[in-house]
Amino acid sequence: MNDTASKPILILGGTGKTGRRLAERLAARNLPVRLGSRSATPAFDWENTATWEPALDGVGAVYISYYPDIAVPGAAETVGEFASLAATRGVHRQVLLSGRGEPEAQRAEEMVKASGAVWTILRCAWFAQNFSESFLLDPLLDGEVALPVGAVGEPFVDADDIADAAVAALTQLGHENQLYELTGPRLLTFAEASAEIARAAGREIRYAQISHAAFDVMLREQHVPAEIVGLLNELFTEVLDGRNSHLTDGVQRVLGRSPKDFTAYANETAATGVWSK
């Protein structure tokens, strides 16, 4: 891991939910960090391959988080192209943020494995932070979460645990060519998760199961970008079908501790006032 200690770690999606937390943790250890985003210098843009080499110049390791999501069509090929370029540039330590039960994400994993890099894959459940830092925040503030999913249990994983796992994979020995499936410690339905947030925030928040057609209309009325509408529709129609309704020991394996429980996330996040109206 000498390169990790002396050369910058490139964090793609460095301002996102996991990338921002990872950057904070690495900086706290006085490790050099380079953020990979359109606003960074040098800029990085997944859609502009000309930006890739400058971002990789002099880098010792990379955290790969694909935008808008690794589940979108074409993501696997793009991630594979980047991983191969990074490996040919001598960036052999690569950590990929992936998703559970997502065929396109699993294809991207195989692409990274085939790149010649020393890889670690963090295959994650739904982020708890989607309720506070993403598309579910506004519905919570409005007092009603309406989604096209019923009594399907999801082991929501905390972005803090993902960031801690990424730090370990990027800076410690023993995580080479390992796949860690990261989940929280228990299953909750979206209705149960909404109820926990309501209790923590001291507010009334309703949950309503709606049709996929109504969900599509709602997203478009909220001016959600078209590519995100398509992604969310796919996730709610395919991935949330029960295939991920089981727990794994990934957090324990990589960090040697239990994952953060959703109640702890809800209480900590409520204390910031983000769900206050």
Image: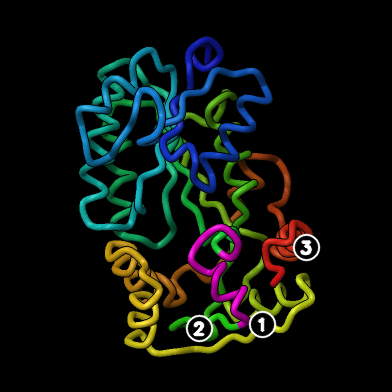
According to the image, label 1 marks what residue? 205
Looking at the figure, which quarter contains the C terminus? bottom right
Q: Which residue is mark 2?
A: 146
Residue type at mark 3 is Asn
Residue 15 pos. (x, y %): 49, 40
x 42%, y 28%: residue: 62
Across and down, in percent, residue 233 comes to 34, 73
Residue 195, quarter of picture:
bottom right
| Crowd around label 1: few <14 · some 14–19 · many ≥20 (10 Å) | many
Circle 2 crowding by C-alpha within 10 Å: few under 14, some 14–19, many from 20: many
Residue beneath disc 3 = 267
In front here: 248 or 209?
209
Name the residue rendered at 48%, 13% in the picture: 7
Q: How many numbered discs?
A: 3
Q: Residue at x 48, y 68 (%)?
A: 244
Q: Amino acid at mark 1?
A: Ile
**Which residues, given as a range, are shown in magenta?**
131-143
Q: How is the image coloured?
A: rainbow
- Placement of 177 over or under 233, stated as above or below: above
Tell which circle, 2 or 1, labels the residue nearer the N-terminal end.
Answer: 2
